[in-house]
Amino acid sequence: MSDTSPHSENRPLTAFAIVIGTVSLFASGDILIKYLTTRYPVELIMAIRSVAGLLLILAFFWPRMGRTLWQIKRPRLVLCRGLVLVLGSLLIGHALRLMPVGETISILYSFPILVMILAIPLMGEQVSAINWGFAVLGFTGVLMVARPGGGLDTLGVTFALLTAILAAIFHLMTRVISMTETSHALLFHTILISVPCSFMLALFTWEGYLPNLMDFGLMALLGLIIIAAHYLLTVAYKYAPASLVAPANWVHIVWAALLGWLFFDHLPDQWTILGM
């Protein structure tokens, strides 16, 4: 079926493969955010990447879809989803600023546990015993990574945990909305909400200087990566239940830890590695 079809189809293997590609893109974006936050405010990075993402959508989708990009059936739910993403992006940006990439993403990925739990009462989904077992193991791992006295920044841990809650809400909303909205229109409205919100945040935190050409290009590249990842995520949730797709996201932790070591020469301690 077309990825712009508004109805759902059960193809779990396809969804799983798409999510693997999606989290690989997200991990690359995490590395860029970590680097850029050592030089610029998180809010400025969000603003520039949002504009780059919006321009990409308009360049590729507008010629083919035109005004249909504006057509959505659940505007309030789409707005709420967009605001959840803005707040989550802000919090995870500051978490990455304060903590190593691998540890930050390990804590963030407690969200699949929340997705599986919330999907039962909110969406009527059935969770298998195997998935519950993975959830328990995952939660144990998060406790090991975020343990008191582990050397991680307390505020950074708090930001990452709050982002996990928002990520669970975002994924469940994506599952619901993708049944009635096209992937293109949903992505367009998500970034459209992000642009003014991130610019308002950037104005409040602006330090009086703009990025150099190289860093500006990296921020724009970050926007392209995030747009591609969110588009694939929207497609994945058309093909399988949220409780089935969410565990695949844990591959993000492996990529984040590996890239954090390659680019920042950071190796997690033995307890953190065990928790991952």
Image (spheres, rainbow, N blue to C red):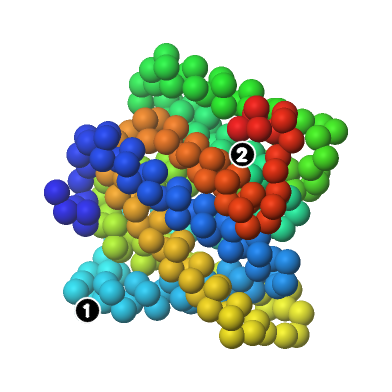
Q: Quadrant of residue 273?
A: top right
Helix, strand, or loop for circle 2? Answer: helix
Rendered residue at 44%/32% (across/down):
247
Q: Which mark is residue 63?
A: 1
Q: Nearer the viewer, mark 1 or mark 2?
A: 2
Q: Which mark is residue 106?
A: 2
Question: Is residue 213 rendered to the left or right of residue 123?
Answer: right
Helix, strand, or loop for circle 1? Answer: helix
- The three-letter amino acid code for the residue at tag 2 is Ser
Regarding residue 32, the answer to whether it shows in the image is yes
Residue sticking out furthest to the right:
149
- The three-letter amino acid code for the residue at tag 1 is Pro
Q: Position of residue 33 (x, y in %)?
A: 61, 62
**Mark with earlier residue (1, 2):** 1
* Closer to the camera in the image, 189 or 251: 251
**Is disc 2 surrounded by few (<14), some (14 to 19) or many (20+) residues within 10 Å?**
many
**Marks 1,2: beta carbons within 8 A:** no
Residue sticking out furthest to the left:
1
Rendered residue at 72%/30% (across/down):
270
Rendered residue at 57%/56% (across/down):
30
Q: Position of residue 136 (x, y in %)?
A: 56, 20
Question: Is residue 205 rendered to the left or right of residue 228?
Answer: right
